[in-house]
Image: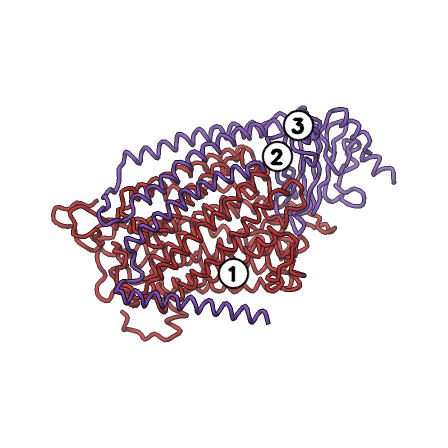
Amino acid sequence: MSDHHKETFITKYIFCQDHKMIAKQFLITGMLMGVIGMFMSILFRLQLSNPGESFAVLEWFLGDKWAPGGVLDPNMYLSLVTMHGTILVFWVLTAGLTGTFANYLIPLQIGARDMASGFLNMLSYWFFFGATIVMLISLFVESGPASAGWTVYPPLSALPQAISGSGLGQDLWLVGMALFIVSSLLGGLNYIVTILNLRTKGMSMSRLPLTIWALLITAIIGVLTFPVLLACALLLIFDRSFGTSFYLSDIIINGEMLHNTGGSPILFEHLFWFLGHPEVYIILLPALGLVSEVMSVNSRKPIFGYKAMVGAMMAIAFLSCIVWGHHMFVTGMDPFLGSVFTFTTLLIAIPSAVKVFNYLTTLWRGSIRFTPAMLFAIGFVSTFITGGLTGLILGDSALDINVHDTYFVVGHFHIVMGLSAIYGMFAGVYHWFPKMYGRMMNKKLGYLHFWVTFIAAYGVFFPMHFLGLAGLPRRYYTNSAFPMFDNLTDINEVITFFSIIGGLVQLLFIFNFFYSIFKGTKSEQNPWKSNTLEWTAPVERIHGNWPGEIPSVERWAYDYSKPGMDEDFVMQNVPLKEGETEH
Amino acid sequence: MTNILIILVVFLLLAALVQVIRVNELLSELKNQDLNKVTDKDNKIQATLFFLIAGVAYLALVLWQFKNWGPFLLPPASSVHGAAIDSLMNFTMGLIIFVFFITQPILVWFVYKYRKTKTKSAYYYPHNNNLEKIWTIVPTIVLSAVIFYGMSVWSQITNADTSESTVIEVYAKQFNWIARYSGDDNTLGAANFRLVGGKNTLGVDMEDIKAADDKITREVHLVVDKPVLLRFRSQDVIHSAYLPHFRVQMNCVPGMTTQFAFTPTQTTAQMKQQEGEDFEFILLCNKICGVAHYNMQMKFVVETQEEYDTWLTGKKTLSEKLLTQK
């Protein structure tokens, strides 16, 4: 296939339809957005630990208008919080994670030459790129970027009079999101079609690696729920620009009586969280998939309970679509609904517990090889337990009353969703880097990156639970207006300290990544001694993945340390020996 | 000038890093090793680090935080339903701390014990249906208890009997709170946002006879042990009325009325004795509402019936306030 058409610079690196290049485009765009989003968090952490103090770095980056005299402006504080959330949730952990690994791994692991539609795939990236540009432009508009929180609840986000960020910044935010959703849908449809139709000979659904199962389930919930967010955003655009009243009613703002009646902001919340909660699992499931693969390979053991793992992911995905109301326990929603959502929400703990126990059993009596990827995979289990457990408090409507929208929530979701997903993403990058670039990432820098990240991340997010239990609301510019929070300064200083350390060490990762692309030591074809099909493809990137025939699949992906075999791994394309039974 | 210096330093650091990696690479070439291959020594070091950092240090620091920062947490609830929430919280917290201190050590121990060594090989163990049944069924049973307990507290809170409650309106707008007492008839007069203007800050409909005795105040006083029903409205965006000491929170949504019923059990004076002279019950805004969101507050005072009567009797009714000027 590769010699049929000549590749120019443009078709190879820019308007490329090869899934491997598109994956790299997603990864690098996601990484750059990640640096921007993370850097924003450090800027607002400075204000939170040292309210009202002057920092040269703030003035340098934000200028006189948004940081007069080096003190962060409250409007800009809210903008930074909003954009940090938006960028990390959608740009890094949705597009950066799924966009990268779904594009990269699906064709290679199921034995396909490319995605079902290379053109749609390319379009998906370029919609994402457009969304990125619009979002970045919104950082530079006169009235400031969107600042109503990443959940952009109206009326705050609908009325330019309510907050300065609800001007042009909010319009660009909505347009950017709409483009982003189109990109997600194009990608998602492509992933589903590819997995269902392009599996190679012998690759039955029950032989799919768990990464592919995770990506398939992610794509399905994405395709079902992202359109609702699109509708939600469009209605908000209508309310903002065309005088409709979907979300607005009985409002006097800045002394001006608005004509809108009959709408409801709660409608927005329902529509938003109908995507918003599955979104958490759109972020988490790919990480679960990547971690399953990395953990099995590096424990030299089959993943424990393959079928239960698939079943648990399906259960999580199904339940994730009927729990959105737990974000709305204190909106005045019918108390009966509160009970129903408590019930469905806490049920998610069951498949999650099954996954954790299966991971632990996978490690049990393994022969664990500590690659940087494996460390991140183990770190994932640690954060998934820590963060998952506090979900039992937030999912319980009665308890949620007092911790809703406090730092307890911030701590919880950063650990269970933010850290877990980013650890899964790091595990994936370290593990598949040799496949992507034919070179190895530096191991020692990888170790350093893991340990500093692990310590700093817990240092940032664990103390937040205490802030929340002390009653401190999130999104406060400073807590100095309330004497009851005066004794929390120490905790805030600890958090800021670790956030700076944790932020800086990510630059080491970025350095390692780009250095290794050009200068890393050359990789063998199958450096981790893995079973899956991507490692049967040659190291060089070729359009079409395999030079000759596509290998056919003879067994599942997890025959590690199988008794009676010559080596401690058996690749998926090796036929069963005589008398050998499948797992 | 400083900017140029900073950029220079960054470049020098980068160059140094590259050189360190190069030296490392050349050294391992000399020794004929693959620099990025994971060795037995690596496995030993990383497993030990994991044991010490993710195991010992992490768990010790979690305990340290409970000990040192525990005292900063909110004092026990000052309301009847709040006590029920606190019990449920203690139960759930106990459960998750228990599970945390079982699963994290297991993870750390497995990671340390089953590191790769020259002698050991991995055990092929793809599944065991009985084990998997156990850890599906046990969490199901435990969670059923949590769900059942949680739902019973929730319905107790949301189905509170409000027939005896004093009705008070809490009105939110950027960026302060206003309260309206329902007066002797214990019924709030009707209100409409179109009537807001001039002195009528809440848009109360003065043609409604029930509005005449309503009183507007800038702080809320409550009688200890007497049930109260707070009714919330908002003028502009979504706010959230958060009274952490009473374990009360309810959103204030423009276009609709929400409510929360509770009974305070501690007076401000009692709390001052326990928590120090600076203590006040405070109403905070807990839903991002604009630039001064962080400073939207109102004082709540809980006192005896006599103190309450003295305070409230001194306030003008709405009819005195709004109708006399005609």
Name the colour assigned to chain A in the rendering: red
Front residue of B115/A464: it is B115
Residue type marked 1: Ile
Image position of B95 with respect to A387: above or below: above
CB under 8 Å between discs 2 and 1: no
Q: Secondary structure at mark 3?
A: loop
The chain to which mark 3 is attached is B
| Circle 2 SS class | strand
Give the structural element (helix, strand or loop) at label 1: helix
Q: Position of residue A523 (x, y in %)?
A: 29, 64
Q: Is residue B294 above or below residue B183?
A: below
| Residue B266: mark | 3
Q: Residue at x 64, y 34 (%)?
A: B259
- Depth check: give the residue in front, A67 or A349: A67
Pick out the residue farthest to the left: A578
Task: Count how many numbered circles sit on residues in the image.
Answer: 3
Which amino acid lies under the numbered mark 3 shown in the image of this protein?
Gln
Whole-number angstrom distance, CA of label 2 to CA of label 3: 15 Å
Can residue A60 be seen in this snapshot? yes
Q: Are marks 2 and 3 in contact (CB under 8 Å)?
A: no
Residue position marked by numbered label 2 in the rendering: B248
Nearest the camera: A55 or A356?
A: A55
**Badges 1 and 3: C-beta atoms under 8 Å apart?**
no
Question: Mark 3 packing: few (<14 Cα in 10 Å), some, or many (20+)?
Answer: many
How far apart, in angstroms, are the residues tagged by discs 2 and 1?
A: 37 Å
Tell which chain the image draws in purple.
B
Residue A306 at least partly seen: no
Residue at 65% across, 26% down? B265
- Do the residues indicated by labels 1 and 3 lie within the same chain of the protein? no
Q: Which residue is mark 1?
A: A36
Amino acid identity at mark 2: Val
